[in-house]
Image (cartoon, rainbow, N blue to C red):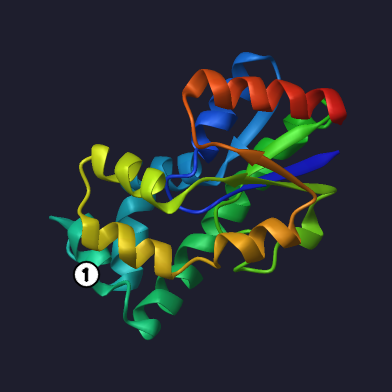
C-alpha cells in the first residue's frame, strides 16, 4: 500500500515523514531526493547545465526564475525524470513493508494522486506555515512564491482521503499521526 503525504510549504510534511521513519515505517521523501540530487556533483552538474545556470549561487538563481513559466517547465523537465528514477530504485526495497509513505509536496498540482492507494493532507494555518518557513532562513518573498505555486489548502483537503491538523507543537502533530495510523 502506497500512501502519499502532501501539504503546502511549511505544513509539516517532512516532520511527519521523519516521525513515521522513527516509528519504523518506510518513507520516501521527494524533497530529500531532490536535495540529494543537488548535493551529488555529477547530477548537480547535469541539472545546472541542462537548465543553463551557473554553479555558483544556483539556488538564488533558481528562486529568482521560478516565476518564469518557461524556466519552470524546463526545470521540471530535467528534475522530474531524475526524481522518478531515484524513486524507482528506492521503492522496490520497500515492497515488503505495508504501508510505505511518500512525501509528495505537489501531489495534486502535478496530478499524481492516482499513483497512490491513499492520500494524507497536512493542514496548517498559513501564518504558522509562514513563520516556520521564515525560521528556516528563507525570505518572505520565497514563501509567497512557493505558496502561490500550490493549490489552496481547502482544495487539497477536499481532494485528500485523510487530514492531519498541524497547528500546534511537534508533540501534538505526533499524537495526531499516531491517531491516524490507528485508523489505517
Q: Secondary structure at mark 1?
A: helix
Up the image or down, 179 lies above or below 123; here it is above
Expressed as whole percent of the image width and height from the top left, the position of residue 101 reads: 70, 36
Q: Residues within 10 Å of mark 1 (few under 14, many from 20)?
A: few
Location of the N terminus (image quadrant): top right
Depth order, front residue of 117/46: 117
Residue lying at 30% horizontally and 55% vertically, measured from the top left: 45
In this picture, residue 109 sits left or right of residue 184? left
Residue lying at 45% horizontally and 48% vertically, measured from the top left: 34
Location of the C terminus (image quadrant): top right
Residue lying at 73% horizontally and 61% vertically, measured from the top left: 158
Residue 54: quadrant of the picture: bottom left
Q: What residue is shown with label 1?
A: 64
Up the image or down, 57 lies above or below 40; here it is below
Outermost residue toward the bottom in this view: 70
Expressed as whole percent of the image width and height from the top left, the position of residue 2 reads: 80, 42
Depth order, front residue of 164/87: 164
Residue 62: quadrant of the picture: bottom left
Expressed as whole percent of the image width and height from the top left, the position of residue 172 reads: 56, 22
Expressed as whole percent of the image width and height from the top left, the position of residue 109 reads: 60, 68
Amino acid at each position: 500500500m502506497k500512501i502519499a503525504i502532501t501539504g503546502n510549504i511549511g505544513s509539516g510534511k517532512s516532520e511527519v515523514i521523519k516521525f513515521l521513519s522513527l516509528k519504523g515505517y518506510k518513507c520516501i521523501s521527494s524533497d530529500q531526493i531532490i536535495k540529494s540530487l543537488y548535493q551529488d556533483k555529477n547530477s548537480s552538474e547535469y541539472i545546472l547545465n541542462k537548465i543553463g545556470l551557473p554553479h555558483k549561487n544556483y539556488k538564488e538563481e533558481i528562486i529568482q526564475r521560478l516565476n518564469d513559466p518557461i524556466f519552470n517547465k524546463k526545470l521540471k523537465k530535467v528534475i522530474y525524470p531524475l526524481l522518478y528514477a531515484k524513486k524507482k530504485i528506492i521503492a522496490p526495497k520497500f515492497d515488503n513493508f505495508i504501508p510505505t509513505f511518500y512525501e509528495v509536496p505537489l501531489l495534486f498540482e502535478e496530478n499524481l494522486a492516482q499513483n497512490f492507494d491513499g492520500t494524507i493532507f497536512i493542514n496548517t494555518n498559513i501564518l504558522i506555515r509562514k513563520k516556520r518557513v521564515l525560521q528556516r532562513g528563507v525570505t518572505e518573498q520565497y514563501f509567497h512564491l512557493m505558496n502561490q505555486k500550490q493549490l489552496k489548502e481547502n482544495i487539497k483537503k477536499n481532494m485528500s482521503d485523510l487530514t492531519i491538523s498541524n497547528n500546534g507543537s511537534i508533540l501534538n502533530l505526533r499524537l495526531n499521526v499516531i491517531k491516524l495510523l490507528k485508523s489505517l
